[in-house]
Image (tube, rainbow, N blue to C red):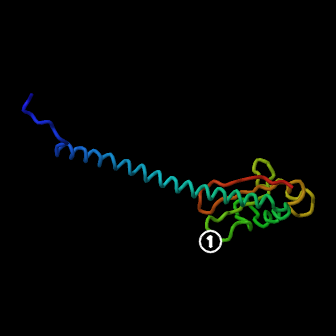
Amino acid sequence: MSNRKQQQGFSYVEVLIASVLIAVALVPAMDALQSGMLSASVHQTLTRQYYLQVRKMEELQAEPFILLLAAAKTAANSSTAGTYSDAAGTADRNLVYIALYDADANPFTITDADKDADNDPYTGDTANLLWIKVMIEGGSTQGLETLISR
């Protein structure tokens, strides 16, 4: 047998090195955890906004066409939020854009505005299709769009 004693635990240097390695590995792990928590919050916000847009779009699709046509006349173009938009100051406010759509090279123009000679560009052959877009004010630039016909 040898006179050496069997080692009974870790030396001070070993404990110090292990502590430093744990501390160095912990920093990126905490950054990853923070990113994961932040992305969950962002996902929750975007999901809530999406379903608010879907609800508003379904409300619009249930409206009589004649009322939507009147809203398109009031808005007068595809970049003006219409009367179906939520009230100003509402959290996650839906902006609603409604415009006449005539399916030519520039779908928001009316090539023959008075085809039926009644001086109303929103009647006649071009008044059968409306473009509707719903998007969240100040949110992403994506929104829901659809076409509604008479």
Q: Residue at x 71, y 62 (%)?
A: 96
Q: Residue at x 73, y 58 (%)?
A: 57
Percent coordinates x, y for residue 126 in the rendering: 85, 54
Q: Is residue 92 left or right of residue 55?
A: left
Q: Is residue 40 left or right of residue 127?
A: left
- For this orientation, the residue located farthest to the right is 117
* Quarter-of-image position of residue 136: bottom right
Q: Is residue 87 left or right of residue 33?
A: right
Q: Which residue is mark 1?
A: 89
Q: Amino acid at mark 1?
A: Gly
Q: Nearer the viewer, residue 46 or 110?
A: 46
Percent coordinates x, y for residue 18 in the rendering: 25, 44
Is 21 situated above or below 66? above
Percent coordinates x, y for residue 26 in the rendering: 34, 49
* Quarter-of-image position of residue 76: bottom right
Q: Nearer the viewer, residue 3 or 53?
A: 3
